Image: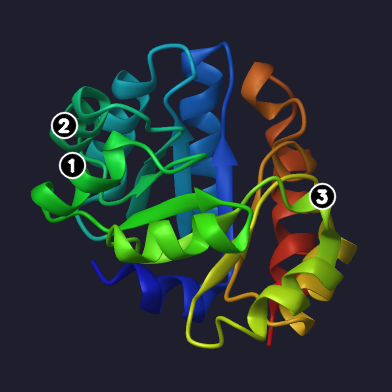
Amino acid sequence: MNLLDELRTHRLLAIVRGPDPAAALAAVLTLAESGVALVEVSMTSADALGIIRRARAALGPDYALGAGTVLSAEDARAAADAGAGFLVTPAIAPSLAEGGRLGLPVLAGALTPTEVVRAVDGGATAIKLFPASLGGPDYLGALRDPFPGTAFVPVGGVDADGARRYLDRGATAVGVGSPLLGDAVRGGDTTALRERATAFLAAVRP
């Protein structure tokens, strides 16, 4: 899977994180059915590896399903074994190098210019600008000047209106958790999740 192409094409990465494995799995499948083409399951979720494994079996080998909040090399290997097609980190961590060794693309967390350089030099496919809410779209715009060739994916506090502003300032895609998932990861209404997915897909449409 070419993660960079997927991010450029679809422009929305859904972040699933929750305490209820069955509800989290249902949320992943609902997102996929609603047209959301990239989903990460946070390793902080209850039974995250089981969720990834079952989602992979349901969605097939070509769906862009990844593991998020991957910090250690051990977690990177476990996520890959469960069927994750890409890794997402909140910071520059051992998982970045391990993802490269495993042949998996990594969306690596960084905030400052120095961290961006370190992540790119470490082999990151794209930069997860996190937490994006600290600087907002204007900060992303400022980063784009010295790093015009770097793909940025703002994550943290991105709602549907903010998604458009980040994209307008040069984001390749946006990553969205609770503003999209709501209470679905705790067994909430999946119909409402479908409606939010439709709204976000409209917001990121070119």
Residue identifier under label 1: 98
Query: Of residues 203 and 70, which is closer to you in this image?
Result: 70
- Foreground label between 1 and 2: 1
Q: Which numbered disc flags the more N-terminal residue, 2 or 3?
A: 2
Element marked by disc 3: helix
The three-letter amino acid code for the residue at tag 3 is: Ser
CA gap, disc 3 and disc 1: 28 Å
Residue 19 vs 31, above or below: the answer is above
Q: Which percent across, then down, holds residue 57? A: 22, 38
In the picture provided, is 124 more to the left or to the right than 188? left
- Image quarter of residue 172: bottom right
**Residue at x 38% of width, y 65% of height:** 120
Of residues 135 and 28, the one drawn nearer to the viewer in this rendering: 135
Give the numbered dot on residue 77: 2
Q: Position of residue 59 (x, y in %)?
A: 31, 48
Contact between marks 1 and 2 (CB within 8 A): the answer is: yes
- Real-space Cα separation, disc 1 to disc 2, in angstroms: 8 Å
Q: What residue is disc 3 on? A: 133
| Residue 101 visible to an observer of this rendering | yes
